[in-house]
Amino acid sequence: MTARSATIARNTLETQIEVSINLDGSGRFSSQTGVAFLDHMLEQIARHGLFDLEIKANGDLHIDAHHTVEDIGITIGQALKQALGDKKGVVRYGHAYVPLDEALSRVALDLSGRPGLEFDVTFNRDKIGDFDVDLFYEFFQGLVNHAAMTLHIDNLKGRNAHHIAETIFKAFGRALRMAVALDQRALEQLPSTKGAL
């Protein structure tokens, strides 16, 4: 089987980012982003998706974390798209419900080739530690646009903002793991009646 992995470097005046991903990994994770809470969330994607994920980022954190978080999402999306290749044999769709104490989130996604994000999440505070919760949307918007996937994220229950965020990222990892899995009954087929994704 061809390795489903990619390394992408993205360099702008605001950020310098390198992402390596292996879709058929074991959940190994390494991150140097300068944004500790984001690192904690990205580790959830790797661990629960069983992806090997390595991220190195240097951004203009003296301003704020916005550019760094968004550009990491963009670069992960680019790496994901490259690692998927022609998408032959993938399941294509994925979904997961993940609880954490009082919080419950649902993620459903489609490796459709069409970017779209529906993000129905309300936090009861503006920050988790020093992390601005608005940046979760920016992260996923960047990822979706560059991976060319449709992604629905819904927080169904929750009071604790940390728990809500963690259920979202764990559910995303689980849903993505399902979608990129190879369907042994259709390894040479694209999962589309159009013949293209």
Image (cartoon, helix red, strand yellow):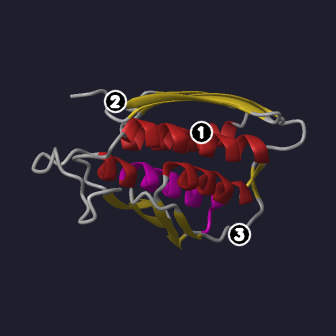
In front of the other: label 1 or label 3? 1
Q: Where is residue 23 in the image (x, y as percent from the top left)?
A: 36, 36
Q: Can you tell which mark lies on residue 124?
A: 3
Q: Can you tell which mark lies on residue 26?
A: 2
Q: Write the start and end of the magenta stretch as one range.
A: 159-174
Q: Position of residue 171 (x, y in %)?
A: 43, 56
Q: Position of residue 19 (x, y in %)?
A: 56, 30
Q: How many labels does the image show?
A: 3
Q: Residues within 10 Å of mark 3 (few under 14, many from 20)?
A: few
State which quadrant residue 138 falls in.
bottom right
Determine the CA span between mark 2 and mark 1: 21 Å
| Magenta segment main secondary structure | helix
Instruction: Give the amino acid at mark 1.
Output: Thr
**Does residue 3 belong to the magenta stretch?**
no
| Camera-side residue of 2 and 86 | 86
Left or right relative to 70: residue 163: left
Q: Can you tell which mark lies on residue 75?
A: 1
